[in-house]
Structure formats: structure tokens, C-alpha cells
Image (tube, rainbow, N blue to C red):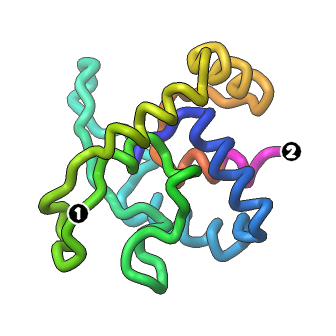
Amino acid sequence: MMVTPIEALELVTYLKENNQFDESLKNKCKETIGKFRLDQQLGNGKKSFLRRTYTCPFFNHQELGCPLPREVKPYGCLAFNSHHSELKAGAECFSEKEILEARDKAIIDEEKENQEIKEKYSLYWDKTPLPLALMDFFDEK
């Protein structure tokens, strides 16, 4: 899952408030980054990059599925909600437009806010895989 600076900061804030931004999460992020080589650009070098799917560090939780509340899930995660509990491999997923529209209304000037967050936290990316984004906030000084 790719996230923007706003999405990453919202998630980090939630995790810190709930004492979940810890070494265990940092280790899960490192494991995911290494396993799926998220720290390496894959492509042909001609502005063409391969899309990759990978496991979110939150999805392989003790419970089946994601433990994060909808209010802090990245925008893209809200687009892939299975509507049949017995299906686990992405089948029968569709967006819940009401949730996506509410999220859009909550962020009035997304581009400006993303730029302010990038400057404040010295981020170089507009979108990056979730584990890499979280690691940038772990490394924050």
C-alpha cells in the first residue's frame, strides 16, 4: 500500500496515541521491506517501474485481517474491503464510496498539507510504501 505524507502522519499519530509505535512495529516494517525489497526501485530504467504487491505490516496480525480502525487506514486500503467474510484473497472487494467521500471532505487542501508535512519532517516522497513511510517517522529526530 502506497501512502501520502498526510496518511502516514495520521497513522503514526494514532499508533503513538495507542502505544503501538514501538520496536515490534519497527521490526515488522523492516521484515516487510526486506522480504519484498521495497527499498529497491524495480523497473527498466526508462521511467517505467514495476508495481508490486506486498503484505502490509498490519495485515498479518494476530486476528485475521487488519486491526486498524477505518479512520486511520490509508485511502487505498478503504478501496479494498471484502464484503464476504469467508473470502480472504481479495475476491468480492469494492469501495465504500461514503467512507472515501468523507475522507476527501476532511482534507480540504491535500496538496498543500502534504507539502507542509514533507517540509516539516524532511520527507522526499509524495507517495511511498507504508512500511518505508513508517520507518521515516521512526528515524525522525
On screen, residue 121 versus residue 132, left or right, reads: right
**Depth check, front residue: 55 or 65:** 65
Q: Residue sitting at 24 percent across and 62 percent down?
A: 82
Furthest residue toward left: 91
Give the alpha-carbon distance from disc 1 to disc 2, as whole Å.
41 Å
Q: Residue sitting at 60 percent across and 18 percent down?
A: 108
Residue 84: x and y, percent? 19, 69
Secondary structure state at the residue bearing disc 1 = loop
- The answer to which image quadrant residue 25 occupies is bottom right
Mark 2 Cα shell of 10 Å, populated few (<14), some (14-19), many (≥20): few
- The answer to which image quadrant residue 76 occupies is top left
- Seen in the picture, residue 12 relative to 103 is either above or below; the reply is below
Residue at which label 2 appears: 141
Q: Residue sitting at 56 percent across and 50 percent down?
A: 71
Label placed on residue 59: none
**Comes first in the chain, label 1 or label 2:** 1
Mark 1 Cα shell of 10 Å, populated few (<14), some (14-19), many (≥20): few
Residue at which label 1 appears: 83
Q: Which residues are magenta?
A: 136-141
Circle 1: residue type: His
Q: Residue sitting at 39 percent across and 50 percent down?
A: 77
**Depth check, front residue: 139 or 56:** 56
Furthest residue toward front: 98
Residue 133: x and y, percent? 58, 45
- Seen in the picture, residue 134 relative to 46 is either above or below; the reply is below
